[in-house]
Image (tube, helix red, strand yellow):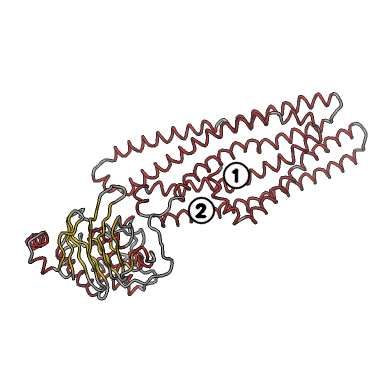
Amino acid sequence: MKELKHLNKYFKRYWSQLFVGIIITIIARIFQLVLPSYVNKSIATVESYFNKSITKLEAQDLLLEFILIIVGASLLSGFFTFLMRQTIINVSRYIEYDLKNEVFDHYQFLSLNFYKKNRTGDLMNRISEDINQVRLYAGPAIMYGIQTLTLFACLIPLMFIKAPTLALYTLLPLPILSILIYQISKIIHKRSTVVQEYLSALSTFTQEVFSGVTVIKAYAIEPQINEELKTLALDGKNKSMALARVNAWFFPLMILLIGISNIFVIYIGGKQYIAGEIGVGLIAEFILYVNMLTWPVAIVGWLTTIVQRAEASQKRINEFLKQEPEIQNQEHSITPIKGKIEFKNVSFTYEDTKITALKNISFTVNVGETIAILGKTGSGKSTILDLIARLYDVSSGEILIDDVPIKKLNLYSLREAIGAVPQDAFLFSDSIKNNIRFGKYDATDEEVIQVAKNAVVHDNIMAFSQKYETVLGERGITLSGGQKQRVSIARALLKEPRIYAFDDCLSAVDTETEEEILNNLKKASQNKTTLIVSHRVSSAINANKILVLQDGELLQEGTHESLNNTEGFYKELYKNQLTEK
């Protein structure tokens, strides 16, 4: 259970509720122990009446008294059992809530490389299914475990006090049960881990299928996808059945061993009764004791399964919680950003692919300037924007923001100062208005409408029946590519950052709309640093400086006029695009 030690901090947080729950559990079980002894007394009373030791009226009064005590104790036991569930089970929900928040917060701190190495379905499964398995350990397992321990602690000494020989034979199967549980639990632990890993694979597969359903339908490959799912499901069924076969041994073994205990009670108790050593009421009392032990003993197997599955799940959760983000915030005080950017001999290689995206790049962008970055696909344009937002750290060289090394800036101050518009615009399954407000949560409706007009998407939005309240499908599937890009631009404009970072965000709009948006951007970005990554020269003409990249190297640098007067990549690109236009 070493992986489950991670939960100790939560147990300490809710120790008072757990302590009260434990006390209530003990009280509930003590009231439950009243029943067998008063059944014994009731039988003894009937025996005394038949033996003429007491009168009929005395027997009736005693029986009524014993019945009232049994009923009262049962009601109190039930009431305290209800309170027990209200304390301990509630604590498990609090721990589930805290653990989900801890995992989710940690997910957000981890760097982009983490998300490249792990699939979304697996991440979702660990924060849902795995945490649910851990919750069963933090609540039901503890509750029933305390019940079982309390019963054993109270019942076994009581049985030995009343009839040592009979108690010894009655409890003889329990050590055998313990050994069997120990051996089976080891197998359960291994197979539980395999099942949880399969659930992650299934979540990943289905999530990708649902996200890519448009492509699946376009290629008419539904039968192949169904076959893949069938194969995956069959594999999962085999893994689950392997676990179920082991679990299936528990309850039959429990029932068998409890049945053997009952046989010992009847046989050994019967012999002692014939010998005059005990009364028949004590035999009935011991049968009740054995049946009271039936559920706690049976629950041991269930508890073992829960603990083993929780251990396997918590181990998977801990694997992620132990991962440290590669991008560390080294400055915890707020660092205001003005917008000057300087690259000094920057090189960068992606860790996962080992591709060198940038090679010895140097340039400077002053506050209020606009810089355009052009180049073929894979030339390193988007990487520059990622490094400025410090989504990655450089492999060599240095980036300065306002003449301060980027690592010495507060990470959140830096990103707060950037309005990024990615090439692949991501929109949430929410209203269009809230998607734009993502850049500024407290924005008024007037502000939202104004930036939508600046992004030339207002008329498109007004054409929808629900206008700005239109709820988008997953990843903004309701909108066209160009509309998604323009909503994403509106989001960045609403934020009013110090640095704009536009990553080929006009690729899906026509040239007339592009020109209108660029004019609006020019007005909105006055006195602010703007970086525009594009394949189109039209996006770069009005920039203060243009960088031309090729294979990660800075091929050309200058204004539109200077580059257009120089033979090279930029002039050729401009001539070709001008001809196309």
Position of residue 233 relative to residue 470, above or below, is above
Side of 130 where 234 appears, left or right: left
Disc 1 residue crowd, few under 14, some 14–19, many 20+, Cα 10 Å? many
Label 1: state its secondary structure.
helix
> How far across and down, in percent of the image, does residue 152 sit?
71, 39
In this rendering, the count of numbered labels is 2
- The quarter of the displayed image where residue 370 is located: bottom left
Q: Position of residue 51 (x, y in %)?
A: 91, 31
Q: Nearer the viewer, residue 488 or 35?
A: 488
In the rendered image, residue 464, in percent from the top left (x then y), is placed at: 28, 64
The tag on residue 99 is: 2
Under mark 1, the amino acid is Ala
Q: Residue at x 50, y 41 (%)?
A: 312
Q: Please, what is the three-letter code of the amino acid marked with disc 2?
A: Leu
Q: Which mark is residue 164?
A: none
Q: Quadrant of the C terminus?
A: bottom left
Which residue position is annotated with label 1? 141
Report the side of 107 relative to 460 (left or right): right
Where residue 269 appears, as percent x and y from the top left, is 79, 27
**Viewer-nearest residue: 113 or 393:** 393
Crowd class of label 2 (few under 14; some 14 to 19; many from 20; radius 10 Å):
many
